[in-house]
Image: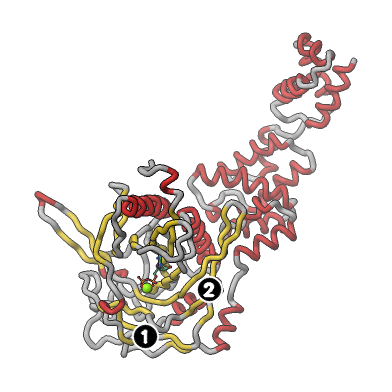
Amino acid sequence: MSRLAPEVLSRYEPVIGLEVHVQLATLTKAFCGCSTKFGSAPNSNTCPVCLGLPGALPVLNKKALDLAMRASMALQCQIQERSRFARKNYFYPDLPKGYQISMYELPLAIHGCVEIELEGRKKRIGVTRLHMEDDAGKSLHEGFAESGRWSYIDFNRCGTPLAEIVSEPDLRTPAEAYAYLNTLKQILEYTEVSDCNMEEGSLRCDANVSVRLRGAPQFGTKAEVKNLNSFRYLSHALEYEIERQIELLESGGTVVQETRLWNVAAGRTEPMRSKEFAHDYRYFPDPDLLPVSISPARIEEVRRSMPELPDAKVARFLRDYGLTPYDAGVLTATRSLADYFEAAVRAGAPAKAAANWIAVELLRRLNDAGKGIAECPVEPAALAELLAKVEKGEITAASGKKVFATMFDTGKRAAEIVAAEGLAQISDTGAIEKIAREVVAKSPDNVAKYRSGNEGVFKFFVGQVMRETRGQANPQVVNEILKRVLAE
Ligand code: ADP
Ligand code: ZN
Ligand code: MG
């Protein structure tokens, strides 16, 4: 619920820039050989390097660099010939080295963009930079108040490779920020840069927010809201923070530059610390690591490894399969769904029918079952077989849906289910005519209505015949026969 009148809100324009941290999908850490496996026993994936023991030497993980380069390319960034890791010094119990290794003045890539689409309108959002860094560990707190207070530290996360992607302050509404994060996530999943699992912390988002009077030449002072680790939190925190700043300005106050946290339980942002500045961190080039130099040949190699990106896939689906933009959008939401669709088409399913069945029936059932397309019990070829039966008129579309439900629940093929349940379409005109005559005989009132020009009741008769045949009558035959019988 908004605390401010709409006419007050509408006088201001929000300005938003996102900083997104994404875990690079490597098996081992950024600078040592420890596993990055999620959920391992606490502190089991550690070594002198990621624990920051004196004398241990880090070595950059090539796969991590390749993934960061792939992300840079997918975000249309310029990959720099030379980049460099720095030490960002700060104290925190879950940071045993006493510094984070992060690219600072020479990031891996700059000047990219992400194209978002909102209500059919496209907008380009600038990507300022993409740089690599390592992650800190995790602190767990337990037993507040009477029972005393305990803190545990798990260093398993320490040294996990991350890419930080910083956007330009080009976003103007929470909805745009949402669309940006969604598109970014989709691109990172397509390129297999990251699994983007938000529950496991593979994708994390900080939002920088300011407001200004519409038409004002300069941006207002921003606050940074940390740790928005779900789409819902991002939307809610932005809505809240925008109103908080407007309210403050309206009451004659000023926004202070600070770092805030989204308090999920209270539904508000709260101050966490005053804004730190770069000089607070005493950045300096990490003397243990070589500068990163990337040859044009290496860039070319990564370019060749790039998969088709979402936009290109949408364009191809529109062109090659004649899908609607809506269906193309739904089917390309993930690479695996798009692959499923194309596998069904390759197995002989007509593209438009396959698109429709997948977008409606299949996704609904997957959603209800809480499953992803990877766990879909119906193989693409099995869906193609079912669609062929509907297409050829062996079963009606209504029966097709029933068969599909059984396929989904049991993993059986369409032919077996149709035979076992006697669902083969009734095209036998004699049988249908008999039923049609019975239906007509039972409803003299409706027959009278129909004959006096009320075409609407025709649907009633069709419905009755379909009911009597358990949805198995060929609808075209039913129509023809009913027209004839009613005209007698
Ligand atoms: P800082 O020096 O505080 O780290 P940066 O200029 O590096 O600030 O920007 C960090 C993030 O904040 C970027 O995503 C950027 O787009 C965003 N940002 C910068 N200025 C503003 C502003 N006035 N309002 C909202 N976001 C901003
Ligand atoms: Zn290690
Ligand atoms: Mg900055």
Q: Considering the numbered disc 2 on the image, is that residue within a helix, a strand or a loop?
A: strand
User: Is 292 placed left or right of 353 in the picture?
Assistant: left
The quadrant where residue 472 appears: top right
> What residue is rendered at 36% in x and 52% in y?
246
The residue tagged 1 is: 59
Q: Amino acid at mark 1?
A: Val
Residue 33's image quarter? bottom left
Residue pointed to by mark 2: 112
Write down which quadrant ligand 1 falls in: bottom left
242 and 184: which is toward the camera: 242
Whether residue 145 is situated above or below residue 406 in the rendered picture: below
Label 1–label 2 contact, CB within 8 A: no
Q: CA distance from mark 1 to mark 2?
A: 28 Å
Residue 163's disc is none
Residue in the picture at 75% in, 22% down: 465
In this picture, residue 289 sits left or right of residue 422: left
- In the picture as drawn, the residue positioned furthest to the top comes out as 444
Name the residue located 54 percent from the left edge and 56 percent from the top edge.
374
User: Looking at the figure, which quarter contains the N terminus?
Assistant: top left
